[in-house]
Image: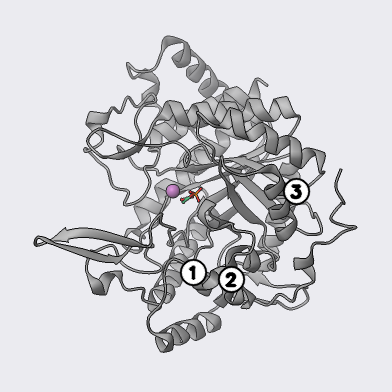
Amino acid sequence: MSDHPLNAQPERDTAPWTPGSWSSTPGARATQFQYPDNGALETARTRLKQLPPLVTSWEIEKLREQIAQAQRGERFILQGGDCAEMLELCRSDLITNKLKILLQMSLVLIHGLRMPVTRVGRFAGQYAKPRSSPTETKEIDGQSCTLPSYFGDLVNRIDFNEIARTPDPMLMVEGYMHAAMTLNFIRSLLDGGFADLHHPEYWDLSFFHNASVSDQRRAQYLNMSRTLADGIAFMQNLGEQRVEEATRVDFYTSHEGLNLYYEEAQTRTVPRREGYYDLSTHLPWIGERNRQLDGPHIEFFRGVRNPVGVKVGPTMDPGELIELIDALNPHNTPGKLVLITRMGAGKIADNLPRLLEKVKDEERHVLWMSDPMHGNGITTSAGIKTRSFDDILSELEQAVDCHKQAGTILGGVHFELTGEDVTECIGGGSGITEDDLGKNYVSLCDPRLNYQQSLELGFLLAQKMGSE
Ligand code: PEP
Ligand code: CO
């Protein structure tokens, strides 16, 4: 076993950290987008620093405690939402439906796993997107034109022209405002409670009866929904208060902390607590493309009190993973680090077990989560980006098996989903085929599970984990 981090603290922990120290890392200058106007950047940063925080330190501390519980197998974390939120889609119906599907999935999981579930939305700030290339080239009027890629509404706009694609720092202020409006609405909805959550008979379970659902699965779903309804009815008999408690819930927000100017501006100390909090969200994460050990994102997030997620893809080496863990959590504190694995259904069995073994052998405290979405992108013959429900389910089930085999704990899942009836992913009981993709494909980024696919996945996960 190597030196325990408590005895041998990595060098980085002793290097001075400030909310702005990320900007002097070697990778900071090579970030994929740059603001051309420094004066405008300073104006936006100053404004963001003055604006009140979006979340509070005590919510962040509470989530840390819940993540620590999930690491011990006493709780499960359900994280989900859009690949990219868009400012113009900050609408009450879309927010309500996204919240509802997450709450419904969480009830299915509470029931199936027999443990509390923490809901974390990819909401209220999921406006910045990493890209595989910093520029995009298109043919315009017979001429080839190269512009910055679209990095999400927090950075630039999607239209393919120079003005829209130039990174605009005031979009950070716009993004903050939309995050605040979204959060404000979510907080009031949760305060009021969702009456129809108490009644699975009001949920849209019509997919049970679709021709694409096998008889065996249909019987399982009907059985599970019946026992779920009985469970809720039982709680109701104990008193409305209990159901209210189960459905009037804490809700946490998360987003990829890609734009460090935005994160830094909302990072501050608070009275009577030690350390700095990134108050733009409860659970920021570092994407697969931005987790270089000497990069700006690791430098920034090692210094905040928030729990931090890191995406872990199939190329991750076990030794590098330990270095990454020690850089972000040098004191090996439970509740701080969430490793979100996204391997792909065809790669998980070859790549996840050695990571699980290594982290277990080295006794690092992490929460393992499975993101079965980002390793499973496919492009149809017509050039449409999609994902197959079967691949997503397969990665999820293999993740459960790998953890079981390694004696480690799968403490959460991470999905891209929406509460709408979109046609972006194929398969599942919804029966969406490649030919259907054009019917209601809304995402500008990655394809999301629709309402029925999400709920069905919730049932299948509850079934798989509940039976283990
Ligand atoms: C995402 O979560 O939308 C994303 C880009 O993921 P990853 O960094 O795992 O590719
Ligand atoms: Co995505």
Say which amino acid is labelled 3: Ala
Q: Position of residue 272 (x, y in %)?
A: 78, 76
Alpha-carbon neighbours of circle 3 within 10 Å: few (<14), some, or many (≥20)? many
Q: Earlier in the sequence, mark 3 or mark 2?
A: 2
Residue at the disc numbered 2: 26
Q: Is disc 3 in contact with disc 2, using a CB cutoff of under 8 Å?
A: no
User: What distance separates the C-alpha of mark 2 from that of mark 1?
Assistant: 8 Å
Secondary structure beneath label 3: helix
Say which amino acid is labelled 2: Pro
Alpha-carbon neighbours of circle 2 within 10 Å: few (<14), some, or many (≥20)? few
Res 90 quadrant in image: bottom left
User: Quadrant where the N terminus lies?
Assistant: top right
State whether residue 219 appears in this view: yes
Residue at the disc numbered 3: 68
User: What distance separates the C-alpha of mark 3 from that of mark 2?
Assistant: 33 Å
Q: Nearer the viewer, mark 1 or mark 3?
A: 1
Q: Position of residue 324 (x, y in %)?
A: 69, 54
Q: Nearer the viewer, mark 3 or mark 2?
A: 2
Q: Which residue is at the front of the view, 394 or 131?
A: 131
Please give the label number shown on residue 30.
1
Seen in the image, is 455 located left or right of residue 340?
A: left
Chosen colour scheme: one colour
- Vertical placement of residue 143 versus 372, above or below: below
Q: Position of residue 169 (x, y in %)?
A: 40, 77
